[in-house]
Image: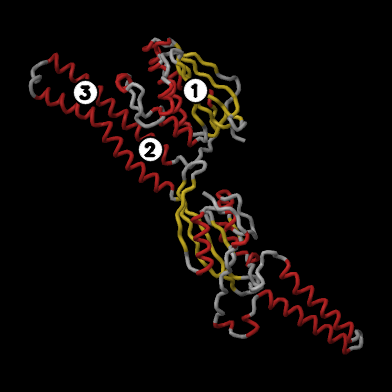
Amino acid sequence: MTLAPDRSDAPPDIAADPVAPEQSSLFASWPDRLRHNALILLVAGLVLATLTISDNLSTVHAGIAFFCIAGAALVPWRLHDPNASRDEPLDTDPVEAPAVSAVVSGMSEPAVLLDRAGRVIHLNVAAAQLAPALRRKELAQFALRTPEIVAALREAIATVTPRRVTFVDHAPVARWMEVAITPIAVPTTFGGEDSCLLMTFHDQTPLRRIEEMRADFVANASHELRTPLAALSGFIDTLQGPARDDAKARERFLGIMHAQATRMARLIDDLLSLSRVELSAHVRPGTRIDLVPLLRQVIDGLEPLAKERQVVIETELPAVPAIIAGDREELLRLFENLVENGLKYGASGGRVVASLTQGTSPEGALEWQARVRDFGPGIPPEHLPRLTERFYRVNAGDSRAQGGTGLGLALVKHILNRHRGRLVIESVAGEGATFTAAFPQPR
């Protein structure tokens, strides 16, 4: 939710700082610009008086020249900024202080220095990337339209006290940000000080995601691990009791126990992988990856499973590199899940087609589209919207029999979200299903 710009609701100015003890004289307490103008007029007056006394200039001409110099010196200070208040002191612009600019620019987190009215004086690269609408000498309230930030900024301007607020940025992915607004005294060009505001942004997303990851892991693990743990416990009790001397039953039970232990290990591995991807969902990968050899590697690794299921994997890959910005390990996991699902649940069709083509997104941007199509029974349409939910299964019994954990497509979705891609699932009953993972091409 954003606030619409309203120029009539401009924030009040911050009161000027009290005069320091060493600036007790009348001239020293003047704002820097006023002192600068006074010095110009004093020098001009002395020069004109000297010329008049030496008869090089008439009194009338000297007066005219003095008033012209006074107008040229004083008027531009008030005309340079149309947003300046008439009651605002002249010394409001510490832009020329190089130390201030260097400190703000050198901060690792997004930082913005504002004057006493809330106009931007300096901002570093991180702040410009976080909020591209910020412009120097413009009010920050109109660029940062988040209600929490606007309210905190107005309070800091009105009360000259620090403010701290947390908000959630939902685009392109959810990010929790904490904004700290701190009043500071900034040295000005001519040796004085000016009251300003330092606004810094702190990304709280990793901490929030760790908390969510911990809660989700406990809930999901306790739910999904209960069945195999109960099976293991029951078989152990049987082997220690009635089947203690039954070699045939012992051999069969040990095989079942091994399968249940393998299922638990696979489930924990998927949960940890999903948690790691979610933890870094707000950080877009920057490594350039060629999808063609990556997809070939995945298909080669799944050939034994394809032969076991009597399924042929056909490939349609481009002759040119398919470059995207991505994380190699996560992309391997994504393609393994898609191709393995095709081999398991579409085995009755006898073949799986893995292709990679260039296309465009709904917004018209170029992207690489990796498709995995099977020719099995397909997926009923009522299940399609929920396939990427954690632990959602079309047929729970069949999924467990195939060794599925119910997390594969959820992991695919989160990996694509981190890569700023999209997942499209299409299916026709009796004709199989097609899973398309689309990745934006780097500019």
Q: What residue does disc 1 label?
A: 295
- Picture quarter with the C terminus: top right
Q: Quadrant of residue 46?
A: bottom right
Three-letter residue code for mark 2: Ser
Q: Can you say whether 33 is above or below 380 in the image?
A: below
Task: Please provide percent x and percent y for residue 293.
Answer: 52, 23
Q: Callout 3: helix, strand or loop? A: helix
10 Å crowding of disc 3: few (<14), some (14-19), many (20+)? some
Mark pair 2, 1: CA separation: 24 Å
Q: Can you say whether 69 is above or below 286 in the image?
A: below
Query: Is residue 61 shown to the viewer in this render?
Result: yes
In the image, is 64 to the left or to the right of 124?
A: right
The reply to whether the C-beta atoms of the residues labelled 2 and 1 are less than 8 Å apart is no
Q: Callout 1: helix, strand or loop? A: helix
Mark pair 1, 3: CA separation: 34 Å
Q: Residue furthest bottom?
A: 53
Q: Residue at x 35, y 25 (%)?
A: 393
User: Who comes first in sequence, dot 2 or dot 3?
Assistant: 3
User: Who comes first in sequence, dot 1 or dot 3?
Assistant: 3
10 Å crowding of disc 2: few (<14), some (14-19), many (20+)? many
Task: Please provide percent x and percent y for residue 409.
Answer: 41, 28
In the image, is 343 to the left or to the right of 359?
A: left
Three-letter residue code for mark 3: Met
Q: What residue does disc 3 label?
A: 257
Q: What residue does disc 2 label?
A: 275
Q: Residue at x 40, y 38 (%)?
A: 276
Query: Is residue 121 shown to the viewer in this render?
Result: no
Q: Callout 2: helix, strand or loop? A: helix
